[in-house]
Image (cartoon, helix red, strand yellow):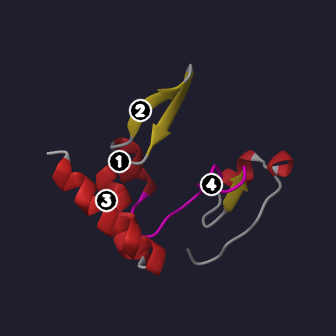
Amino acid sequence: MKHWSSLVLSDLTVQDLMQQDIVFQFGMTPARVDVMTSIDGVAFSDAWEQRVRTHLSDIPLSIISLHHLKQNKHAANWDTDKMHLASLEKYGKQNR
């Protein structure tokens, strides 16, 4: 991420979601959700085309694919991303 901006959820607009490098968060750790309008190493069009569609209760959700999540973690290259990537690689080998 080049630039992090915090938004109050009630102030969020469609225009905010159309800007690059915007992050908004809701909830508290460990159940916090971060919504990012762009991520390192993955184009939105590619992520959207290969998204995973699921449901939480009766609410439809689209989630980044495992392949693109790994690609993002590798590109971001933060210490926490390196730890997450190692866990994701191990997970992928267990579920083949």
Q: Which residue: 55% across, 74% down?
A: 1
Q: Earlier in the sequence, mark 4 or mark 2?
A: 4
Q: Which residue: 40% across, 66% down?
A: 84
Q: Alpha-carbon neighbours of circle 4 within 10 Å: few (<14), some, or many (≥20)?
A: few
Q: Which residues are magenta?
A: 27-43
Image side of residue 25 versus residue 56, left or right: right
Q: Earlier in the sequence, mark 3 or mark 2?
A: 2
Residue 88 badge? 3
Q: Which residue: 73% across, 69% down?
A: 5
Going by the numbered disc 2, the residue's amino acid type is: Arg
Q: CA distance from mark 1 to mark 2?
A: 9 Å
Q: Earlier in the sequence, mark 3 or mark 1?
A: 1
Q: Position of residue 49 (x, y in %)?
A: 35, 43
Can residue 66 be seen here? The reply is yes
Tell me, yes or no, whether the highlighted magenta stretch contains residue 65: no
Residue at which label 4 appears? 30
Q: Nearer the viewer, mark 3 or mark 1?
A: 3
Q: Secondary structure at mark 2?
A: strand
Can residue 78 be seen here? The reply is no
